[in-house]
Image (tube, rainbow, N blue to C red):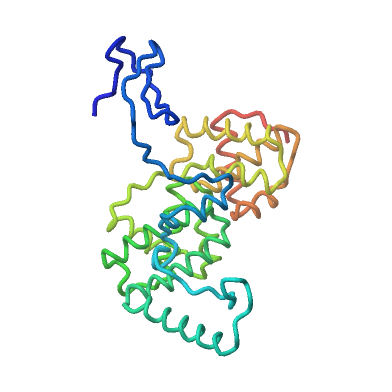
Amino acid sequence: MAEKKCPECGSNNLKYDYARGELVCMKCGLVIDENIIDEGPEWRAFDSDQREKRARTGAPIKFMKPNKGLSTEIDQYNKDIRGVKISAKTRAQMQRLRKWHKRASISTSIERNLAIALTELSRVASALNLPSNVREAAALMYRKAVEKGLIRGRLIESVVAAVIYTICRQYGIPRTLDEIAEVSGISKKEIGRTYRFLKVDLGINMPLTNPVHYIPRFASELKLSGEVQEKAREILEKAIQKGLISGRGPTGVAAAAVYIAGVMMGERRTQKEVADVAGVTEVTIRNRYRELKDKLGLDVPT
């Protein structure tokens, strides 16, 4: 659609005056259109509560809910419209209605699968402190896997763990395979196998894990300053430019960079402390430390 311009001066600096229902050129003042229909709501809201109560469109779609949040639910408050507690007989009736409503809403095998999987996804995501947008993305990916029939014959928990690991990598969130395996109770081998399976069948283009993403988290847990974080970032960027991290675990490289930066900036932490935070061994820290120090020519105090 072509952009509107003023027929008088050719300016595209136009403004809608909704109070008068006019389209006005801000350069020459020409009224281009009048009696414009206001397509907005006929009501006003002065805070978020009023906006929610007066809106007629309902809540947005939530992939984390089995029914996407579009169906009605019978609440658990057991109170009438005036806030007065309902009688015991009515409470029992409402409880029966809730039970049958739940059974009716989860009738097919796919709905039952989603009910179980999304509950597990919420549990694992909460344990990993993942934000709501990441949870929604993971739920959407799981739904795609269900629609393509990729879940059949596989453990729900392993698919959920693999989906969360995939989304964390896509969003650049520093969560390791070890952490996800510990929270989900599924072995790293099983999660890795399911992850590779989903990656191929869903056609996911997975970027390489950037070790720089782990620096703020490791530095925060070790109570290191922002200067140390910046120094570790510089070390890693030089290592990436020289191709020193190829074939190396990103957590080990990031941990070694944080260790070196701490020593260079006078905020020394032991290799054991850094290894415990990063979830790697001290041997890995020492090996990556020597590689970075020798290949980058770093002057690290002893």
Q: Residue at x 47, y 80 (%)?
A: 98
Placement of 1 over or under 44, stated as above or below: above
Q: Is residue 37 left or right of residue 238?
A: left
Q: Is residue 210 left or right of residue 46?
A: left
The C terminus, quarter of image: top right
In the rendered image, residue 174, in percent from the top left (x then y), is placed at 53, 49
In the rendered image, residue 57, in percent from the top left (x then y), is placed at 41, 54
Which residue is outermost to the left?
1
Placement of 14 over or under 165, stated as above or below: above
Q: Residue at x 60, y 45 (%)?
A: 255
Q: Depth check: 221 or 78 in front?
A: 78
Q: Residue at x 52, y 60 (%)?
A: 125
Placement of 259 over or under 87, stated as above or below: above
Placement of 2 over or under 48, stated as above or below: above
Q: Depth check: 265 or 179 in front?
A: 179
Q: Depth check: 275 or 116 in front?
A: 116
In the rendered image, residue 114, in percent from the top left (x then y), is placed at 39, 70
Which residue is outermost to the bottom?
89
